Amino acid sequence: MEQLTLPKEKLPELLGEIGSKFELVGPIEENGFLAFRKINDPKEINLDILLSRVPPKSLIFQQTETLFTYAKGKDSKVQTPKIEETKRVIFGIRSCDARGFDIIDPVFMGKKEGDYTDPFYTKRRNRSILIGLSCNEPDANCFCTSFDDSPANTKHVDILFTDIGDKYYVEVVTEKGEDLIKKVSKIFSKATEKEGNIRKETEKAAIDAISRKMNTEGVVEKLDKMFEHEFWVETARSCIGCGICTYLCPCCHCFDIQDESTLKLGGRVRVWDSCMYEEYTHHASGHNPRPSRMNRVRNRVYHKFNYFPKNDGIFGCTGCGRCIDYCPVNIDIIEVIDKVKEVNV
Amino acid sequence: MVENKELIRVVEETVSRDDVKYVVGYKRGTYGFQIKPAFAYSAKDAKEFFYSPLCAKNLATYPLLEEKLPLRRGEEAEHKKIGIVVKGCDSRAIIQIIQENGLEREDVVLIGIPCKGVIDPKKIAKRFPKQSKFVDVEENNNDEYILEIGGTSHKIPKDELLSDVCKSCEYPNPPLYDILIGEAEEEFQPEHFNRVDELEEKTIEERWEYWEKHFQNCIRCYACREACPLCYCKTCMADLLEPQWVRRSVNLSENTAWNVMRAFHLAGRCISCGECERACPVNIPLMELNKFVEKEVKEMFDYTAGLDTEEKPFLGSFRPDDPEDFIS
């Protein structure tokens, strides 16, 4: 892994250069929150706010994806939208959000040879180069360390930037990352051992600053035993059934497919869906296997902390804390898991 | 000033009644300035109830979220009351729902709280970020909020943290209640809802640009709808497939349709609790839409929602003497 440094004041220059060669996406502040948008001027980028409100999963697993369009009548034809295949650089992604891709990749790209791969997700994922940015000052509800992750983990990104004072410490992780570094200017310097140590200390300080912890030990087995427990009724009592926790989750990936048409034109779209909605499991017959909020809240917890680990050997949660931050009724997933462990079965 | 001891005593007493199923109120949340809805099934559950200026959430939505499971043959539905802790606006929501036959008066026991206005959770979280432990806030008699973080005491002028919607509130005291905690507050002299006035001064183009900027961020999580005590349709028009009024595609056009339709459906019904705006994860100033419609309804028809359970709902009423002059 190549270790470089970049003086902070050179960042706009670097991003300008990346922007001239690739499509550049980064975090900007908009209406009081952070959003990943196409960057035209590197000065727009905001690196002070930790997490974007909507996770960058939306760049690859788009909220609305047109699968095909059609026209009726004499000139009828079915068209599949083209997805740009030139490289796109996503700058400023945080560890937890990048790890989200590792969790949902198998869903859309298959686990083994011969599995179905979704062309839309796969193309966007392959064209993306992730430049991560370590979190030096984690937020109140950050708990990525509970999943053996770190705010400065190189594992999920192609290149990782860490703020070490007046410089960025730059680690080039993958081949994709190396190719990118080769294509942009030579404003990087080789990192010294001293700088490497500062980077390590920075990471340690950030890990120490994370105050919340989810203890997931034994939770999979415990959940196996308490599906019918009254606990779920109590946990779901305050849930109002909105989609915030799922839509802002970097790991949630459920979708609905709909045909939308006017008289002559139409298309099939794939849109995000949420297991928190009653309609989500509503059968055409009228029957609903998850008729109450209890069923739905329970499903969300089970999917992340029981089904996912059993099927894929990984929890469906990265510890970004968004569902805790934005739940209108303070259903706190750390508290839920803590209480799961206390339940007597 | 609401004494928590008194509140707990009243909740204990209410939940102990044979005809009450449970009482919903507030308890301290898991971090920062978060509060949680609390449910008391017995007197001992009442201990965790509390009230502070952080208790913004409108709990009137809970009786409507009660899931009625199918009954077995010969089984009769349980007719028990739900106790709810209500501020002025929450009480008005209940009145409005009763007016619309969404609830019966005898379905609920209202524990009224004279309200001095609530803190905007977004404003206080911005002012004091990164609080991983619960922090309570009190209000003194000097129009200041007092809070203590890490041993340091902070005094913040009320105006800086107060929810915008509270600044234009005319009904701090619950118009309908069964038990009132403490003394009724003096009626305030509300400011006009400045945000609507400011918007009205803008040109059509400027206003469209403003709303476009917000609506394009809407992720259609429907938190506004779910948090709203008056969005209680069994099937929302946004969920209908046949006919499909709003498409599922998330784009500016459909998002605008959704938000404008919701505002229309709340015409003469919205009681200005601000719950939709508080719940919105992408900061859409939804109360500006609702307040605009409220103002129109007031000016044209001299109608205010949620004040009298016996009154006819706005859209179900006709008065030849309403102030709208286009008739004459």
Image (tube, grey):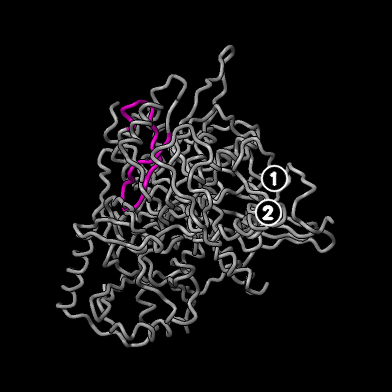
Q: Is residue B91 visible?
A: yes
Q: Residue at x 33, y 34 (%)?
A: B8
Residue type pointed to by label 1:
Phe
What segment carries the magenta color?
A: B24-46
Q: Residue at x 48, y 48 (%)?
A: B172
Q: Quadrant of the C terminus of chain A?
A: top left
Q: Secondary structure at mark 2?
A: helix
Q: Nearer the viewer, residue B261 or A57?
A: B261
Q: Chain under label 2?
A: B
Nearer-the-camera pick, A90 or B164: B164
- A124 inside magenta stretch: no
At a point 44% along the width and 66% down the height, the residue shown is A33
Kindly identify the amino acid type of the residue bearing the numbered disc 2: Val
Within 10 Å of disc 1 (Cα), the crowding (few <14, some 14-19, many 20+) is: some
Marks 1 and 2, Cα distance to the nearest angstrom? 9 Å
Query: Measured along the vertical axis of the image, is residue B181 above or below residue A259?
Result: above
Along the line of sight, which residue is nearer the eye, A219 or B50?
B50
Left or right of A3? Residue B54 is right
Q: Which mark is residue B314?
A: 1
Q: Residue furthest top?
A: B74
Q: Which residue is mark 2?
A: B297
- The answer to which image quadrant residue B201 occupies is bottom right
